[in-house]
């Protein structure tokens, strides 16, 4: 089957969804209420990579290094490597699926095409609820770095502001993300310099490579990898925005690995520098680990810049997360898995504006009561489920559709399942509960279209 052939038949019903490739100045399709329901292709390779970087760089460094250090000590570097390998497998699965199905929705769409409607829904629900938790965590992280004494008001303001930015279009989102990524990289460069040149760096802090013995040590490494995986999940933003990428069959397979590769290098350099400067115990006990590492030596004057960088990095991640979740909600509404009033795409700004506004309101409500560490654990569980389904979907690709070796999809799927079950018990139980709730919601809400099974 060539890449230009029509979508295959999914189990139990024929896939009929299509994509209208609208260009600026041309009318998009409209729904029965007169609202447009397709998106415009504005993004080239550079902006796609920038959106992926904006989703990844910052989340792990500023929010997950502390919990990972508690789980594995210095072994968080090993956990980082494990997370990167699994993320790479997931990335290539997402890339080849996104090139085959260049529609908004990511694995929700891929699962429907390749595995059936139920698996697609489970992936979409997991993505939406997991990334809503991620949005809340990033809002709170931004608030914690910007105003540690009163983080919640800042977090609420950040969520409201960036919801507004997303409302006015993806090109503005990509432009602002480019600025935030550049400023974040400058701040992280300052972290590396302060940690390595501040006089406290000691190679002895890297020994032992991990804490504990036997199965306990392995569990700690895997839990650190699961928590750090939270940082790598941003490459999915490129896939979920596939309907807005120009020439997706070529652009997406290049953009996703490029964004992931850059992020891995940045994470490793910053993590290694922080461990050399203060060791794993101080990182584990800090709510602002990079600020602690930077301030430990003679170049502690970089610390205010690190706090600004932490806030900006979190805002960059939040901006891209909001865009990706809104588009998955749009795809699910198109298939009647979410209320159909979410289908509308703004005729001027070209965004799913109703989904964006609803998402922003939910994130603000969660931020008012949420805990950052719990949000990270729950988000990791839900997103690992999402990527397990992505790998299973990619496994079914044949011939020219399959651009990489099939065993890599097995490594990704098994890795996702293993990491999910090494997370803290509360994260696992909450994840199961919310996924089960999603199944109940679908059963109660869905009205099958005529001539098609649900």
Image (cartoon, helix red, strand yellow):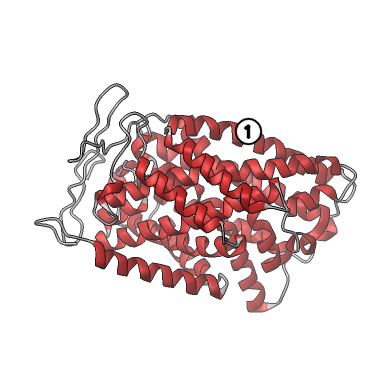
Give coordinates of residue 309: x percent, y percent: 69, 41
Q: Which quadrant of the view contains residue 298?
A: top right
Give coordinates of residue 256: x percent, y percent: 47, 42
438, 251: nearer the viewer: 438
Residue 5 visible in the current orientation: yes
Q: Which quadrant of the view contains residue 77?
A: bottom right
Q: Residue at x 16, y 59 (%)?
A: 448
Residue 259 visible in the current orientation: no
163, 408: nearer the viewer: 163
Q: Residues within 10 Å of mark 1 (few under 14, many from 20)?
A: some
Circle 1: element type: helix
Q: Residue at x 17, y 48 (%)?
A: 16
Please identify the residue farthest to the top as the structure is shown: 25
In the picture, the quarter occupied by the N terminus is top left
Q: Residue at x 61, y 56 (%)?
A: 81
In the depicted structure, whether residue 151 falls above or below residue 103: below
Q: Residue at x 39, y 41 (%)?
A: 241
Give coordinates of residue 242: x percent, y percent: 36, 40
Q: Where does label 1 land, which residue?
A: 182
In the picture, the quarter occupied by the C terminus is bottom left
Give coordinates of residue 230: x percent, y percent: 55, 56
Q: Relative to 134, is 143 on the left or the right?
A: right
């Amino acid at each position: 089957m060539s890449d230009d052939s029509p979508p295959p038949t999914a189990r139990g019903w024929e896939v009929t969804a299509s994509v209208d490739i609208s260009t600026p100045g041309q009318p998009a399709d409209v729904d029965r209420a007169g609202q447009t329901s397709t998106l415009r292709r504005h993004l080239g390779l550079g902006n796609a990579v920038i959106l992926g970087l904006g989703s990844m760089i910052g989340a792990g460094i500023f929010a997950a290094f502390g919990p990972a250090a508690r789980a594995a000590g210095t072994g968080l570097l090993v956990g980082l490597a494990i997370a990167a390998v699994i993320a790479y497998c997931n990335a290539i699965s997402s890339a080849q699926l996104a090139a085959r199905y260049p529609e908004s929705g990511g694995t929700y769409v891929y699962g429907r095409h390749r595995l059936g409607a139920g698996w697609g829904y489970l992936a979409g629900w997991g993505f939406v609820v997991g990334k809503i938790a991620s949005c809340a965590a990033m809002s709170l992280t931004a608030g914690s770095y910007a105003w540690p004494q009163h983080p919640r008001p800042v977090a609420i303001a950040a969520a409201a502001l960036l919801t507004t930015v997303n409302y006015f279009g993806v090109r503005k989102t990509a432009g602002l993300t480019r600025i935030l990524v550049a400023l974040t990289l400058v701040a992280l460069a300052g972290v590396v310099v302060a940690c390595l040149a501040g006089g406290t760096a000691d190679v002895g802090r890297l020994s032992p490579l991990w804490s504990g013995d036997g199965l306990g040590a392995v569990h700690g490494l895997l839990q650190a990898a699961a928590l750090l995986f939270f940082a790598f999940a941003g490459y999915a933003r490129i896939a979920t925005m596939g309907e807005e990428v120009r020439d997706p069959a070529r652009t997406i397979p290049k953009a996703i690995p490029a964004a992931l590769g850059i992020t891995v290098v940045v994470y490793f350099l910053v993590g290694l520098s922080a461990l050399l400067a203060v060791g794993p115990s101080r990182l584990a006990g800090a709510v602002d680990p990079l600020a602690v590492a930077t301030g430990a030596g003679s170049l502690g004057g970089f610390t205010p810049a690190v706090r600004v960088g932490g806030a900006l990095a979190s805002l960059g991640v939040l901006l891209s997360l909001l865009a990706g979740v809104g588009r998955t909600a749009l795809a699910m509404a198109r298939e009647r898995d979410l209320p159909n009033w979410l289908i509308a795409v703004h005729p001027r700004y070209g965004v799913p504006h109703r989904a964006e506004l609803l998402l922003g309101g939910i994130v603000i409500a969660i931020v008012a009561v949420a805990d950052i560490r719990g949000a990270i654990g729950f988000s990791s569980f839900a997103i690992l489920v999402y990527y397990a389904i992505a790998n299973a979907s990619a496994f079914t690709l044949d011939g020219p559709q399959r651009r990489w070796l099939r065993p890599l999809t097995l490594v990704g799927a098994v890795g996702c399942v293993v990491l999910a079950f090494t997370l803290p018990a509360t994260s696992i139980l909450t994840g199961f509960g919310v996924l089960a709730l999603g199944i109940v919601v679908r059963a109660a809400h869905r009205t099958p279209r005529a001539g098609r099974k649900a």
